[in-house]
Amino acid sequence: MSRKNAFLIHFCLSFLIVSTCFLIIFVVWYPGYYFRVFAATEVLKVLISVDLVMGPLLTLILFRPGKPGLRFDLSVVATLQLCALIYGLHVIYQQRPYFTVFAIDRFEVLARQDVDIERVDPTLLSSKSWHEPVLVVAEMPQDSGERSRLLEETIFEGKPDIQYRPELWQPYLDATAEIFSKARPVAELGDKSPRARIEINRLIKNSSSGDRLVYLPIMGKQDVYALILNPDTKLPIGLINQDPWEAASDSALAAKQAADFPG
């Protein structure tokens, strides 16, 4: 076998394995817009560079027919590739979105390790599909004393906020009225960004709700996005790469200017 053929075989095998892993990542662990929210690209870059580039490249450099110790060299390369793949997949799996929590006026996506799973209501966990996070709502305690104690613990004692406290969670569909009372019309998002307007028009075209779609902020690992909600199904249907608070403030400013300077 020539050096070139060894490189091509190694590359094709690596490509097949990495492609299968990517399929699992994008379809099962980070479906739809969740990959963008969790900003998991850095780990994937490591997987690609080590398993798809460095491995085959090392084979190209090391392979020489009849070379003493060739099998050992190639086994070391394969072992390094496998270790990098297992480590990368482990990190991506551990950080995968497991809960999408609405709290106060925004959504936040949490990994399983972000909360004490033992404190999560088993009925909420039983509702999790094989490829989507569990949708829940975190509510402030109704009792004023408990509410004050929660605020003190969060502000002064550094304890987790309500989205990280499973004992305050309830099923998403039981609190949609509260969620949609905080939502804003999707048309506000496209005022400053032509790219956002294109994405919004696509969502409107593909949705039976048309221009009645609304949005709420969703906190990403690095940025804040606008999560688009369908008012008929009450469920999220897409993501817009636009700062929703910026759009809301612009809309409020425009309304104020219109009131101050009518006609």
Image (spheres, grey):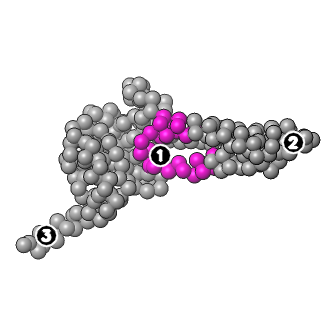
Q: Is residue 217 above or below residue 12?
A: below
- Report x, y in % for residue 232: 21, 38
Q: Is residue 27 magenta?
A: yes
Q: Which quadrant holds residue 65?
A: top right
State how far apart marks 1 and 2 are (Cα).
Answer: 43 Å
Camera-side residue: 45 or 257? 45
Query: To which residue does mark 1 refer?
Result: 35
- The answer to whether residue 196 is seen in the rendering is yes
Quadrant showing the C terminus: bottom left
Instruction: Give, as a three-letter code, the residue at label 1.
Output: Phe
Instruction: Give, as a three-letter code, the residue at label 3.
Output: Ala
User: Secondary structure beneath disc 1?
Assistant: helix
State how far apart marks 1 and 3 are (Cα).
Answer: 40 Å
Mark toward the start of the polypeptide (1 vs 2): 1
Q: Which quadrant holds residue 16?
A: top right
User: Secondary structure beneath disc 2?
Assistant: loop
Q: Is residue 245 left or right of residue 92?
A: left
Q: Is residue 135 left or right of residue 92?
A: left
Query: To which residue does mark 3 refer?
Result: 258
Name the main secondary structure of what is drawn in magenta. Answer: helix
- Which residue is pictured at 41% across the width and 29% down the height? 128
Query: To which residue does mark 2 refer?
Result: 65
Q: Is residue 85 left or right of residue 4?
A: left
Q: Residue furthest right?
A: 68
Camera-side residue: 114 or 187? 187
Chain part drawn in magenta: 21-47
Crowd class of label 3 (few under 14; some 14 to 19; many from 20; radius 10 Å): few
- Report x, y in % for residue 53: 68, 49
